[in-house]
Image (spheres, rainbow, N blue to C red):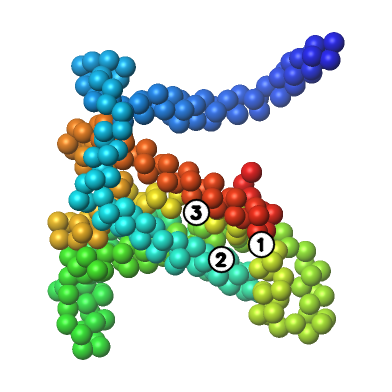
Amino acid sequence: MHAKKKSSNFIKSLHKNAGLYILFFIPLAWYILFQYVPIYGLQIAFRRFNPSLGISGSEWVGLTYFKQFFTSYYFKDVVWNTISLSLFTMLIGFPVPIFLALLINEIRNRRFQKVIQNITYIPNFLSVVVIVSMLNLFSDPSYGLFNTVREFFGLPAIDLIAKPEYFQPMYVFSNVWQFMGFNSVIYIAALTSIDPCLYEAASIDGASRLQKIIRISLPCIKTTILIMLIMRIGNLMSVGFEKVLLMQNPVNTTASEIISTFIYKNGIKKGQFSYSAAVGIFNSLINFLLLVSANFISKKASKTSLW
């Protein structure tokens, strides 16, 4: 009887909220179709894939392609480039939106506050191609902005794009500039939900603005910061593929070759589907382990977690 009652209530709910269920079904269907169905094809990482034989008809080779990647001479360089670039981006790029959100929250003039927020948000709408084109123009040794500044201080002009040691700084700081406004939105939303009475009480006690930020603002958005940090750590091995590929050239490859560009070159250009699939699984597995570890540590240390 209890099961029949539940079934009856579910059917009534379907009729009552049919529109909402339809709206929910569309993204659910997309997610299943493009995220879960392709999992079947991951088995080509363990097979010597032959398009004429199909996935299930191709020869099973086990961990051959994983061993090939782990024992290759470029394994350490590719993995290190991926980790170092992602860590550099996180160390610089993660706190900047928080500081920006705190700054915008402290601006009392609402019109000026909106102007600052819009100015920092607009770069998010620029395409990767435009950003890389700007970097190429700014770093040009003849007329680029960066070299004009260098010459002003008496330093010689250099082709920054062609120097491997400048690849990561250019990638990271352009990334911070492009996304800091967009990434600050969630922190601004969290700050606006703080009870104003807390700030009023602090003002009565004689607290300065900095003390209010340290004692009220940051603790109140701590949960949001930790959740965002866990998610960022879970994507540590996922570096912006398009931007890296566009910034890459034969001269700076030693510093710019990462796992995603390596998969593209071997899988799409060279047709080594099984090998690139194995590298992709390795990359995803590392991301998964990092996500689980970060979530576990955060849950133990601060009782904040994704699950």
The tag on residue 197 is none
Quarter of the image for the C terminus: give it: top right
The answer to which quarter of the image holds residue 81 is bottom left
Q: Are marks 2 and 1 in contact (CB under 8 Å)?
A: yes
Out of 209 and 256, give the one closest to the viewer. Answer: 256
Instruction: Identify residue for label 2.
Output: 98
Relative placement, left or right, of 204 versus 287 is right
- The image position of residue 278, as x and y in percent, is 31, 36
Inter-mark Cα distance, 3 to 2: 14 Å
Quarter of the image for the N terminus: give it: top right
Task: Specify the amino acid type for callout 3.
Answer: Arg
**Mark 2 or mark 3, which is nearer the start of the sequence?**
2
Q: Are marks 1 and 3 in contact (CB under 8 Å)?
A: no
Single out the residue that lies furthest toward the bottom. 154
**Mark 1 or mark 2, which is nearer the start of the sequence?**
2
The tag on residue 232 is 3
